[in-house]
Image (cartoon, helix red, strand yellow):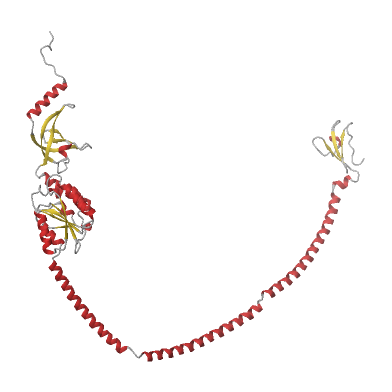
Amino acid sequence: MDIFSDKRILTVSRLSALIRSTLEENFELVWVEGEISNLSTPSSGHLYFTLKDTGAQLRCVMFKGAAKNLRFRPKDGMVLILRGRITVYEQRGDYQLIAEYAEPQGIGALQLAFEQLKERLLREGLFDAARKKPLPLLPQRIGVVTSPTGAAIHDILTVVNRRFANVRILIAPVRVQGDGAAVEIAAAIDDLNSYGAVDVMIVGRGGGSLEDLWAFNEEVVARAIARSRIPVISAVGHEVDVTIADFVADLRAATPSAAAELVVRSKQELEGLVESLAHRLQREMAQQLRRSRGELERMSHLLRDPTFLLGHLAQRLDDQGARLRLAFAGSLRRRQDRLAALTRHLRIVNPALQVERGRERVITLAARLDQTARRLLDGCHEESAVLSARLNALSPLDTLGRGYAVARTIPHHRVVRDAADLAVGELLELFLHRGRLLCRVEENPVAISPET
């Protein structure tokens, strides 16, 4: 009997599917708390991490659709509260939590996102005072980025009309809360910069909760304010409300009404300022006129009769002319004396005289050189004749001319001085006064004594 006949055999895939179905049916929605570790953020946009406590750990995944709605950035070591459903990843046989919502423990997700973005933009320098632009003194056109139906625009228009009705208002209507509001606000800021005919810009809305004001905490709005060429006043909420836009803007106003008061000076205030400046100008002009009148009177007393001054100057001119003529005559005389002295000196050192004397000296030296050369040459000829006679007396050719000969052996060219050194048949070479002979020894040589 087959032992497996009464048993139900499952494949691994089938068993994993049954476990998955059981878990998903019984743990359709769970809340779980733990510490993040092994966080992975691939280019797909999904988040993979492990949630752990002191006794266990749980694999978790948050898919791109849920991850992009997070207001903060998860990090390793952060304690989170997750909402999700339990399932099985069948390829590995692991059970895991598919997270649909996450918030940090002890602090709200929005507050954490606010602190994270604030710290990052602070490091980049977007809050630096050095990059803040000054507000114009008398703006002609004010741009307002806010909701067209909210209380903020009503407050801004009321204050502007009361303080200086001649200013033109350009409204860029946007949503100030909800999904997509931040993108609309950033686009409106860019549009006003592209329009170009705006002197200053107010960006804001009325009060509300942190969630209501969140569009002004979005990075896209902060970046748009930072790159704006137009000075930006942030007027978000009430005085106690603080947003990222407040830190990046060139100036923060406590309320939209306060922003309008900052950007538009009161007409009465300006008129009073102009009147005060006019009074100051009149006083300064009167004082300057009095000082100038006194200076004129003082100078008029010092001013002499022009004819007297001209006569004095003419006398000085004549005196200076006479001195100039004397000085010129003296200078001319000194220069003439100098020229005469140089002329006399030139005659003494005349180059033509020097050349003539040199030519005569050259002729004399040439004659002396010729005589010396002839004398030396005659002496050389006489000495050469004496040496030639001595050389002829000692020359072997002179001896050969008297009938003598020189014998040398062949092929060794040994000079023969003794007949006993020769053998019969040996070849000899005889040198005569004119020419040479080749000889062979036919008989035994006979030695001849000098006395023979």
Does residue 283 lie above or below 316 as drawn? above
Q: Position of residue 410 (x, y in %)?
A: 82, 35
For residue 413, which quarter of the picture? top right
For residue 200, which quarter of the picture? bottom left
Q: Quadrant of the C terminus?
A: top right
Most extreme residue toward the top, as rendered?
A: 1
Residue in the foreground of this view, choosing between 230 and 170 = 170
> In this rendering, does residue 125 appear at all?
no
Residue in the foreground of this view, choosing between 251 and 450 = 251
Q: In percent of the image, x 88 and y 36: which residue is there?
A: 447
Q: Left or right of 374: which side holds 50?
A: left
Residue in the foreground of this view, choosing between 335 and 385 = 335
Q: Position of residue 197 (x, y in %)?
A: 22, 58
For residue 54, which quarter of the picture? top left
Q: Quadrant of the N terminus?
A: top left
Most extreme residue toward the left, as rendered?
A: 26
Most extreme residue toward the right, as rendered?
A: 452
